[in-house]
Image (cartoon, helix red, strand yellow):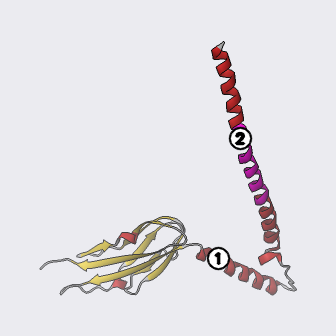
Amino acid sequence: MYTLFNMVIQRSFMKFISKLLVLPLISILMASLVTLSCFGSELDSKLKNNTPYGAHLNITNQSDLESKRSTNNLSSTLTTEQNKGVLIVKVTTLNGEHGMNTSSDFTVNIHANGPVPDIFKGNTSGTVVRLSMGMYSVTTSSTPHYNSSFSNDCNGGIMKVETKYCNIVIAYSKSE
């Protein structure tokens, strides 16, 4: 009898707690879905008009249409580029007494999500690379008798709001 009574109380308590926790959670989720639904329909109307803020275009001929399309593509590209992290890559070459190469003699490769640019010639002033959020790494072309060393920010993860600095030192190492 005691065990049956105990089970009934436990079930009642569990139902009470689940209602106490689940109902507010469900209402929060429903409110979020309604908000997202409203945002989605607003976004759909803007996309259908293919203009910022849903403004209507006054297009009279084909050249006007092409002009508007290129303007929209440019603003889309700028927005996309602004949503990327920044990696500044500097290449320094140390030749010692025998080496003859400069930083631009080495090709830098960026391995990441959508790097711009992804391949370029090294330079001492630095190259700005835009990366989508995620993991990345930097490599250089190999040249006989030169060894590359990379700073900590030459690989790892990047967020869209971050700026990181990758310093590469390429040193001549042939001893004579």
Q: Is residue 51 visible?
A: no
Q: Which residues are magenta?
A: 18-35
- Number of residues whose C-alpha sits closer than 10 Å to that of mark 2, classed few (under 14), some (14–19) or many (20 or more): few
Dot label at residue 34: none
Instruction: Work out whether mark 1 precedes mark 2 in sequence or the reverse, and give the earlier one.
Output: 2
- List x then y, in percent, for residue 164: 44, 74
Q: Nearer the viewer, residue 158 or 62?
A: 158
- List x then y, in percent, for residue 86: 50, 76
The residue under the point 59% across, 76% down is: 81
The residue under the point 20% across, 77% down is: 173
Q: Is residue 18 visible?
A: yes
**Quadrant position of residue 59:** bottom right
> Mark 2: which amino acid?
Leu
Q: Is residue 25 above or below residue 98?
A: above
On whether residue 22 falls in the magenta region, the answer is: yes
Question: Where is the C terminus found, in terms of image quarters?
Answer: bottom left
Question: Where is the N terminus found, in terms of image quarters?
Answer: top right
On whether residue 110 falls in the magenta region, the answer is: no
| Count of number-bearing discs | 2
Dot label at residue 79: 1
**Quadrant position of residue 107:** bottom left
- List x then y, in percent, for residue 18: 69, 37
- List x then y, in percent, for residue 22: 71, 42
Dot 1: element: helix
Label 2, on which residue?
Answer: 20
As drawn, the residue found furthest toward the front would be 2
The residue under the point 34% across, 77% down is: 168
Dot 2: element: helix
Q: Nearer the viewer, residue 25 or 76?
A: 25
